[in-house]
Image (cartoon, rainbow, N blue to C red):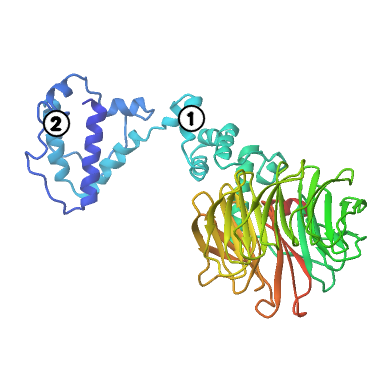
Amino acid sequence: MGFYGTLKLIFYKMKRKLDHGPDGRTFPSGKKHCKGNGPLGPSSLVQATPTTFGDLRLANGHSAQRRRVTSGPPPTGLQDWLHTFQMWSGPERLLALDELIDRCETSQVKHMMQVIEPQFQRDFISLLPKELALYVLTFLAPRDLMQAAQTCRYWRILAEDNLLWREKCREEGISECEWSHRRSCGAAVGPWKAAYIRQHRIETNWRQGDSGEPMVLKGHDDHVITCLQFSGNLIVSGSDDNTLKVWSAVTGKCLRTLTGHTGGVWCSQMSVATVISGSTDRTLRVWDAESGECVHTLYGHTSTVRCMHLHGNRVVSGSRDTTLRVWDVSTGRCEHVLTGHVAAVRCVQFDGRRVVSGGYDFMVKVWDPDTEVCLHTLQGHTNRVYSLQFDGVFVVSGSLDTSIRVWDGETGNCVHTLTGHQSLTSGMELRDNVLVSGNADSTVRVWDVRTGQCLHTLQGPNKHQSAVTCLQFCRGLVLSSSDDGTVKLWDLRTGAWLRDVVALQSRGSGGVVWRIRASDTRLVCAAGSRNGTEETKLLVLDFDVDDRKTETD
């Protein structure tokens, strides 16, 4: 053992004595005696030439003349005692120090620690090459990195490294840096750290509720908002008043009203600034949301257009006339007609390769749209099919028979029947093999479609009090709206209720949240009532506080 090892051992003994208090037990004289073949044996001590504590202080840049205790003249015989101590061997010195520490009072041990402890406070990060220091810091959590940045100037330089924060962003799934947000986070903050701070702030705002007062967008008079789309900074609402309205998600202003339908609008889809709407007037219309122009009117269906799904430049529509039609959005041409259902088509999914449809004939059908061939008819439901999800592998159908069925999209086989809901499954979201279903029984359930297992039932004392009308999940969160006039936020992983994001004043007495749409930073809710207790309106909540401050400035 060298000098450092000896000093550390002394320091440990002093700290232990302090931990045990002034009345700590005195070690017997032979308790700490070192054996010759142990790590503290004479052979290990004699091999290294000891370095004095004074030399160590000089090596650390401190003055050799340390502060002396001014309690009076030195005791008689001090020099003889020190001379005797220097004559002893290493093990003998350790034994003497051990006995000396046991006889010291707490204040005396504290004095020794104040002298010795600073000599072991070595800044190993500053002593490493920068590349190695940065590698060590990659093992720290972002919160710890921010604390490390407050240690000293050099640690701050390292902890602010842009590539280091790029790695932290990659771990959190943040793929784009925030050059535009550097001003709000301070000029010294790199774009990747700014991106991380912003995303963390948004996540906290979602979970804890800092979104400020919602913007209220009033329109459509007292009519029902039947469909809602949200893309970028544009919101598009469709209503049974025959119109669609385009709103700014930033200012809350109604930018334009899209008129032309002669019946209520029942469904819509949106991509960037292109909006497609379907109506009871049996037509689809393609709109430019920026100009308000109706680009195409798509004729062909002979009854209400009830559902549609847009993928790329093609949209598939389903109608009460029992057919589906495939349209080219850019030209307005009907490319294919899919016939086979014997009752109204209520829901449709399209991934660019396959069309999946569900109808009031209790059937789910899988189509090749290019050949107009029905590849599979999925039979099993005993009542109307109201909702569908399709991720290219699994088809998931929700029915009025209370069950949800998971099908293999290639073979048409029923893989699982998910039971537990007590009523109509009105809406579903499927992502990464996790299915979230909302039901008229007032509950939301989370499923693993690979195993058919119900992971969570989102209920309890804070559950919805009426039918679930719409849901979405993102950022590890589930959002659900209901006829009870609330929008609730749940943790997808644990199934725990987090808070009510929206609670209408007329909740419980007629107020309804019909539709919700969410992005990473905003939530849009379409709300109203069927009895006049709540005005028809849109509520916009912005969770990007930083964005809002920048825009206000």
For the image, the number of numbered tags is: 2
Q: Nearer the viewer, residue 524 or 269?
A: 269
- Apparent side of residue 368 relative to residue 73 in the rendered image (left or right): right
- Apparent side of residue 501 relative to residue 90 in the rendered image (left or right): right
Residue 225 rendering spot, x and y as whole percentages: 78, 66
The quarter of the picture where the N terminus appears is: top left
Residue 425 visible in this rendered orientation of the protein: yes
Kindly report the distance in space between the C-alpha atoms of the residues bearing marks 1 and 2: 41 Å
Residue at image mark 2? 93
Residue 333 rendering spot, x and y as whole percentages: 89, 45
SS class, disc 1: helix
Give the amino acid at mark 2: Arg
Mark 1–mark 2 contact, CB under 8 Å? no
Residue visible at 20% across and 47% down? 17
Residue visible at 13% across and 27% down? 41
Residue 135, numbered label: 1
Residue 105 rendering spot, x and y as whole percentages: 19, 49
Reply above or below: 514 against 119. below
- Apparent side of residue 544 relative to residue 293 in the rendered image (left or right): left
Task: Choose mark 1 or mark 2, whichever is in front.
Answer: 1
SS class, disc 2: helix
Other-residue count near label 1 (Cα within 10 Å), few / some / many at <14 / 14–19 / ≥20: few
Residue visible at 64% across and 42% down? 195
Residue 513 rendering spot, x and y as whole percentages: 70, 69
Q: Nearer the viewer, residue 129 or 271?
A: 271
Residue 80 visible in this rendered orientation of the protein: no
Other-residue count near label 2 (Cα within 10 Å), few / some / many at <14 / 14–19 / ≥20: some
Residue 106, numbered label: none
Give the amino acid at mark 1: Tyr
* Sequence-wise first label, 1 or 2: 2
